[in-house]
Image (tube, rainbow, N blue to C red):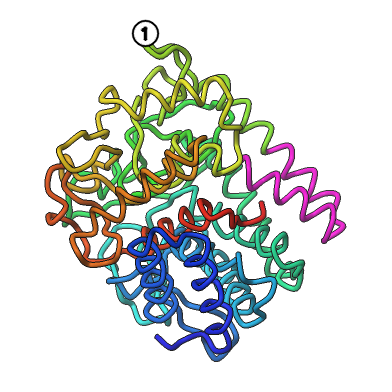
Amino acid sequence: MGKVAGSSSSIEKLQQKIKEILPDFPGMTAIFDHCFGNTLNTTIKRMPDGTTFVITGDIPAMWLRDSAAQVRPFLALAAEDEELADMIEGLVRRQLECILLDPYANAFNESPNAAGHQDDETEMSPWLWERKYEIDSLCYPLQLSYLLWKNTGRTSHFNETFRQAASTILGLWRTEQHHETESLYRFQRHNGPASDTLARDGKGSPTAYTGMTWSGFRPSDDACAYGYLIPSNMFAVVVLRYLREIAAEVLNDEDLAGEALLLAEEIDRGIQTCGICEHPDYGPIYAYETDGLGGRSLMDDANVPSLLSIPYLGYADKDDPVYRNTRRFILSEANPYFYRGSAAEGIGSPHTPERYIWPIALAMQGLTADAPEEKLRLLKLLEATTAGTGLMHEGFHADDPSRFTRPWFSWANMMFSELLLDYAGIRIKT
């Protein structure tokens, strides 16, 4: 991957500024430098057509979710650095084109080279690395489109491709409100763990109509236990409101604005009606998943969107009482994926071994914390658990950070970077 031309100066200025703001934390600022450079120089590729292809790290494919999260901290510089803004716009354009190739796919190849999981039992194509349908795969490109506008004033990416992609997303989410009766999506993988495939011949576990939209998989790429993934539906509500604003203020499309707002209201009503339950110790909390039939999962996963990330996503304020209750629940051992060890405590994921904590979740805990002291505590914890690599991992053992998955993980690197920027008072406009 080549360096993004013209971006070195602004990044070096930012790195120097961070060192001046935080002179007492050279270890943290060194990790920040390393994370920024690693993402920029090893994962981002400008294409001849002006688009941008961003690999997730050790896999040569582009996830719609990961790629958006990987470039998000660069938005802090995009208003003053045209090359970085061009890079981000190039990614938005590429993501929108990918959605039009197949809105059910989560990961794409750089070319139609048939790499990836071509043996999966679903409608694969040579462009697709993987076709696990996840709501957040469609949320992230809409979010990045909106944030690029808000942080730079650019609107050139709101073109006909954007209109088509937005219409495709609206249509898919409406179809998946009625997954049992209207959806043709199926997914089975016969050569992996149970979490890699959907039950009922690829249709997934049964659901009833709630107003929410169905998801086959979580942002961890693990199968949903119940079809309505609450944090991803929350993210959909947020980006549908973004779409309404874009349609009204930029595209002058009243029909699109109205459709986006109506769908947001329906999904939100489903969340509030079916996504909240009474916990005996914590009071009203959000479930992680539900099915509209009485089944639900009380937990949180490290991957974003998560219940922990609700204020970060913009669905509810940090002071929202149901969020406060939910936060206390998921940051306790009542959450089956919260681990407390001799080296760290935090949220992990069924995607990785038991007692492995994810830096993404620690960074999100800091980004949604009230007190600067808590943000700093989590930054210090992240610094102390790199096992000397100077980069973030996917997960590390709660008792022994030298036991980790992935030597480096670009999404986690940039989540650490965003938390450090936040602590230094530099924030992305939302």
Q: Amino acid at mark 1?
A: Pro
Please name whichever residue, 303 or 331, is drawn nearer the observer in this view of the structure. 331
- Give me the residue at 68% from left, 56% from top: 167
Please name whichever residue, 388 or 192, is drawn nearer the observer in this view of the structure. 388
Please name whichever residue, 59 or 133, is drawn nearer the observer in this view of the structure. 59
> Which residue position holds label 1?
280
Inspect the magenta stretch and tell me whether residue 383 lies in it.
Answer: no
Q: Position of residue 127 (x, y in %)?
A: 42, 74
Query: Is 337 situated left or right of 323 in this image?
Result: left
Q: Position of residue 318 (x, y in %)?
A: 56, 31
Q: Main secondary structure of the magenta part?
A: helix
* Rendering quarter of residue 92: bottom right
Q: Position of residue 90 (x, y in %)?
A: 59, 77
Q: Which residues are magenta?
A: 237-263
Q: Quadrant of the N terminus?
A: bottom left
- Give me the residue at 18% from left, 60% from top: 387
Q: Position of residue 72 (x, y in %)?
A: 54, 62
Query: Is 117 situated left or right of 139 in this image?
Result: left
- Element under label 1? loop
Q: Residue furthest front?
A: 24
* Rendering quarter of residue 190: bottom left
